Structures are given as structure tokens and as C-alpha cells.
Amino acid sequence: MDRLQKTNALQERAMKSMPLGVNSNGRFWGKGCTPYFSRGKGSHMWDVDGNEYIDYRLGFGPVILGYAYDEVDNAVIEALHSGVTPGITCEREVEVAEAVINMCPAVEMVRLVNTGSEATMNAIRVARAYTRREKIIKLEGGYHGGYDYVLYSTYAPPTAYGNRRDPIKIPASSGIPRALDDLIIPIPFNDPEVLELTLKRYGHEVAAIITEPMLGNFGLADPKPGYMDFLRKKCDEYGILWILDEVKTGFRVAKGGAQERYGYRPDLSTFAKSIGNGFPIAAYGGRKEVMDIVGKGVTQGGTYAGNGVGTAAAKATLHIMQTQDVHKHIDSMGTRLQKGLAQVFSEVGIPCLISSIPSIFSVTFGLEKNEDARDWGKADSGLYKKLAAKVFEKGVLIDEDPREPFCLCYSHSEADIDFTIEAFRQAVKEL
Ligand SMILES: Cc1ncc(COP(=O)(O)O)c(C=O)c1O
């Protein structure tokens, strides 16, 4: 019997009611191979056919503790019974704001919102208002949300990016008004010379440089030593705000995100994903002096901002992180997996680049270095995709898109990791 019989039937049905049969384009992997979720527990998920997978996508990163994590879910259930969207501030919101400030060294004031896109959108507005400037610099391959004025030079093949000294800005979608081209300046990651050149030309018109701590949506390129310090210094020199987009890294790469792990001091930071173990909650915050303009002529509202479900999840998730060795466990499981995968590929003589840290990393073929999206564009995506499809048959779920990282969670066990390494070993042999 076809192991994906119900999955494929559901896809046929879904495609009649939803474009591509999904609610977010990245969930469509093609006809006959797109998974449809039935349930998850801990590090495992089951598709609608009942096939079980050890999950390293974890919903694009947020499930930091594990699916259906009792302590979090019970807190949410309790909140549900008290009414979740009063549109009036409750103590739990204050507690979550305090926890974020305690955990993240660059955050002195914070606002809670619902999605990463909302967080970056508001941070950019604050930066524009604070500096009285309009242009934004972003890094090629960086992703900051699904709205028009940041959707540039993200998904496009890096061969289209033009000369690195004078990058072509590439809108990621039809429907983005051409008038917005003027407001965004994409530059290659890890290139201080191009950053300097760009600032000499546009520096006094730039409100903010928005970066992820590493390219977390494009094959995980880490910053070269000194690059982020240089960026911080240049921001100060030109009166530009640095927005560190920690939507993917926040509460994942350390309790206090990349700003704790690497000592970064951005002016504004954005968070989502791991803050609530998969429940919809996000935050933006930063220096008091900057955040203090919110509500003083700078608008930000939202019916669901600080809602009971998201804040109950965040309160419980952050409490668990503060009282248990969540990150130590994740690091140890990620290290075991990284070592095992490196061993598997070296056994068969396939050169493989495993980039970034144990809690979030990429496996890339055909590259010796990955310093920016232009490097990553030369990777052998075909081999990665074949492997992803093979391990999927064997009960291991990684994203079929090689730009998306492997993520680890608190529920991954040594047995999960060893099963995964063996699945890769078999898959490599079969290929
Ligand atoms: C770094 C980063 N910023 C922003 C976003 C947008 O977050 P959301 O999908 O919650 O709107 C994402 C989503 O993947 C992200 O990875």
C-alpha cells in the first residue's frame, strides 16, 4: 500500500480550496510529496497516514521544547478558561515583557505582537521615525517577513544579484509596488567594503540596517569575525539603528539569543518562533530611548497583540528555559547530530559543509565556504533534495528546501539522533 495514500488524497482535496493546497507557500513541496500533519508529540510528528517522523523542521524553528509540551499546553489551557482577547492589558503580558528584558541583554523595553513579520515591520517603523530617515539596508538572502518592503533579494537565485559592489534589488514577488524599490538597499553579507561603499553613498538617508545574526533562511552563513562589530561601528558613525532580527535565533541559540551568545548590542531586536514554543507570539524591543517613542506619535496596535494564548505559552516557555538546562541539552543533541552526519558523509567521500551551531545548522554539498547568499547559490541543491526525500521515507523530517536549517529541540533524545544518523547512512548508500 502507498505509504502516502491519505496524504495524497488530502492534498488533492486541499488544492481545490487553497492555492497549492497550503496556507503558506513554503509548505508546498510538490504534488505527491507534500506532507500533511496529523499530530506531534515531543520531537516526533505523524502525518495523516500515521507515518512517524523525527522532526528537525519543527515548524520552521519555533517548537523549541517539543510538540504538545505539557507544561506549556496546560498554561495555555488555563488561560483559555479565563478569556483570551480582552483587549485590556493583563499581568501576564507584563510578566512576559519582564522575562524578555531579563533574558535578552539588548532589550530595555519591549512590545508583544503576534508574528515575526509584525515584529520587524514595527521595528522598522520605529527606526524610521526615530532617525527621520526612510531607507533600509538589508543583507542578500536575509528574510525578515512576508510583507512588501522587506521582500527583496530573498528567494531569487543569487546569479541574479548582479555585481556585489552594485547589487541589483530583486523583489521576491509580483505585486510589490515598484515605488518601494527606492526604500531598500540589499548588500552582500560579510562584505565590509561594500557596506562602507554603500554608506558613503547613502549613509545619511538610511534609518536602519536589518540583519539576522547569521543568514538563517539561506543555508546558514555565519558572520566573519569582526563583521558585526564593524556594522555596529558604522551604524554609530552614520546615526543608523541596527535592527537585529532574532526571529529565528532568539531564545534558540542561547537563552538570550544571539545577543547573549555573541555579545551583540543592536538598537532594536525582533523575536518570534521559540519565544512561545510554536504558539503565535512575537516581540520587538530595544533601547529604552528608542522604544520610548512608541505611542508618542508612533503608532502600533493590534487586536491580538499580547493575547492570552500567546502570552501564556511564552510565560511558560521562558520559565522552563530559565529554570532548566534547555539550551545545554539542545546543544549536546545538535553536536551529536553534526558529528554523526559529518562521519556519514566522510565515510562515503562526499564533501559536506555543516555550518553554524548545534541548535540550528545547515548541511550543504558542493561548497567549501559559505560566506553569503552568493556563495550558497553555487551549492549542490539536487543532492540535498534527494537525500531529504530518502530520509523522509525512513522517518526523518528535514525541509526539502536546502536553505532551511535543521533545528533541534529539548525533546530530541540520543536515540532520536542515532536513528537519524543511521537513516542518513542508509539513504546515502541507497543514493
Ligand atoms: C529571521 C526571520 N524574520 C522574520 C520572519 C517572519 O516571521 P513570521 O513568519 O512569523 O511572520 C522569519 C520567518 O521565518 C524569519 O526567519
Image (tube, rainbow, N blue to C red):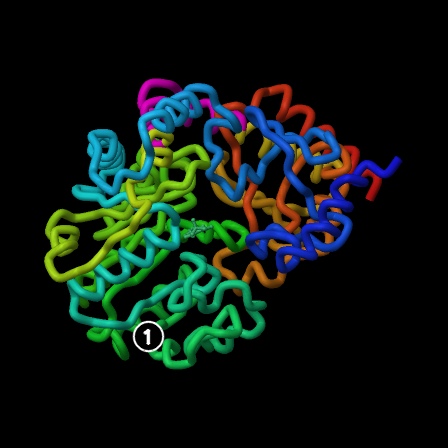
Instruction: Classify 10 Å Cα crowding around label 1: few (below 14), some (14-19), many (20 and above).
Output: some
Residue at image position (59%, 63%) is 377
Report x, y in % for residue 268.
24, 51
Residue at 22% x, 66% y is: 128
Q: Which residue is mark 1?
A: 183
Of 401 and 224, nearer the camera is: 401
Quadrant location, the C terminus: top right
- The quarter holding residue 429 reads top right
Please check the rendered image and state whether residue 106 is part of the magenta-colored stretch, yes or no: no
Residue 342 visible in the shown view: no
- Quadrant of the image for the N terminus? top right
Image x and y of residue 92, in percent? 25, 30
Horizontal and vertical percent for residue 384? 69, 49
Vertical placement of 384 versus 407: above or below? below
Q: Decide: is 326 above or below 308.
A: above
Residue 222 in sight in this render: yes
Q: Residue at x 64, y 38 (%)?
A: 37
Q: Which residues are magenta?
A: 314-333
